Amino acid sequence: MSATMIKEFRLPDLGEGLTESEIVAWKVAVGDTVTLNQIIAEVETAKAVVELPSPFAGVVAALHEQPGTVVEVGKPIVSFEIEDDGSAGSAPDAAAAKREPNLVGYGAVLEASGRPARRARTFAAPAVPAAASPVAPVRAEPVAPVRAAEPVEAKPAASAPGERPRSTPPVRKLAKDLGVDLEAVTGTGEHGLITREDVQNFAGGDQPAAAHELAGAPAQALAPQARGERETRTPIKGVRKFTAAAMVASAFTAPHVTEFLTVDVTPTMELLARLKASRAFAGYKLTPLTLVSKAVLIALRNHPTLNARWDEANQEIVQFNYVNLGIAAATPRGLTVPNIKDADRMSLLEISSALTELTDTARAGKTSPEALSGGTISITNIGVFGIDAGTPILNPGEAAILALGAVRKMPWEYQDEVALRQVMTLSLSFDHRLVDGEQGSRFLQDLGAMLADPGMVLAMV
């Protein structure tokens, strides 16, 4: 029988020197057999949620951190039991020599061949069909028994066996401190969310939610002191923490100037309608943002100063000869600004596809750290929220950001008469160290001219 050995996997640097990440969810459990580069966890950095691949092929021996825990880079998060072929003792540096990147500079090739030893697994609940929990594995640790006073059938949105109970990181920490098993707690929050009060009441032997359900009273009928605290505190971390720090640094480092231009974009909207009806664009998602993005890329050819960066350390102005177009995206985890690499080389069709992929990925929380880095100029579409104009803050390291307002039908001067036209306000913020008022104004003027008359593009290129 082959000998086995324990290998620890330490949290790697997931890009750009990030010092910590939060364990969002484990995709494996103790006793699971995993293959090299199999996804074992989701972790949230200050920028995005990243899937973490396994650097070893073997059996999961221990999970050192719980979901919701913020872990410093370099700390062990999981241990594997792998087969020892005897090479480890004679060549202690062999593993390091064979290390290959598979996740932002971290990873490993298979260190041993053959099948790893299989550990016996224990289950706290009877097996359920695979369809009941397609992703989350069954937890290896035993589950605390349900208290007799708690009607199991009354639990709202009960978690499937092996699935982490619905709760927030602060609540999970409170439960850990009080020695409460969340799987035995009834959640009274929205969609069965376990609240601080649920944990505190359970720890004190009191379960008001279950009592009200048994009495037929609605949860809203709870006494005021049991409804919840007057304040809710949420730890500042992850994307929100990064965004806040970046915006503060930008606002108090770069001297912002914002200019506004209201444009009759009726011709652009008419062009958009024709493109949507065109066979060449069948299956593509076209929006005003698509056409504005293309217009921005064309305008930058004549106004390259807006596609630059102020390098304070080296006292240099870095002029980009390419455009990585950032698109601000509102996601459940906060604002992110992923960018389309080399957007200036793309056709309108390619920009349309890139925008669709970018927004879908951002909303799913799957944007990679690489996609959030290296932007050169950004666009934020506040018009989708019905807002007309604003003063956007520069994305750090960029010279300009454009905000698109809502397209509204308004009385407007047209051919010496008043007509009902489709109007949009453009808001351009720029770094006054890099862009003079004249340069910013002329860029905005050219952009507006293209949107007021798309035929002007022929004069711009």
Image (cartoon, helix red, strand yellow):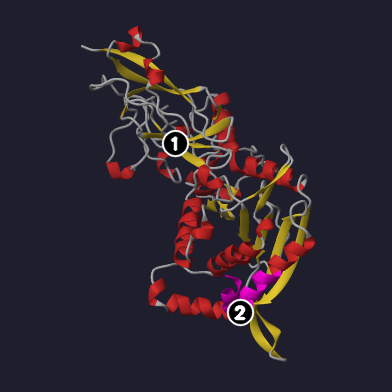
Q: In the rendering, at what x and y percent does residue 9 appear?
A: 43, 23
Q: In the rendering, at what x and y percent does residue 277 appear?
A: 43, 78
Q: Residue, x 78% and y 45% (percent of image)?
A: 252
From this viewpoint, which residue is outermost toward the top? 90
Residue 164, label in figure: 1
From this viewpoint, which residue is outermost toward the left? 1
Nearer the observer, 327 or 96: 96
- Secondary element under disc 1, as helix, strand or loop, is loop
Q: Quadrant of the C terminus?
A: bottom right
Separation of residues labelled 2 and 1 (CA atoms): 55 Å
- Secondary element under disc 2, as helix, strand or loop, is loop
* Magenta-colored span: 445-461
| Local crowd size for mark 1, using a 10 Å CA cut-off: few (<14), some (14–19), many (≥20) | some
Left or right? Give the position of 347 relative to 422: left
Which quarter of the figure has residue 305? bottom right
Q: Magenta stretch: residue 349 in it?
A: no
Left or right? Give the position of 152 relative to 441: left
Residue on which disc 2 sits: 453
| Local crowd size for mark 2, using a 10 Å CA cut-off: few (<14), some (14–19), many (≥20) | some
Residue 332 seen by the camera: yes
Q: Residue, x 45% and y 29% (percent of image)?
A: 106
Of mark 2 and mark 1, the one earlier in the sequence is: 1
- In the image, residue 276 above or below residue 306: below
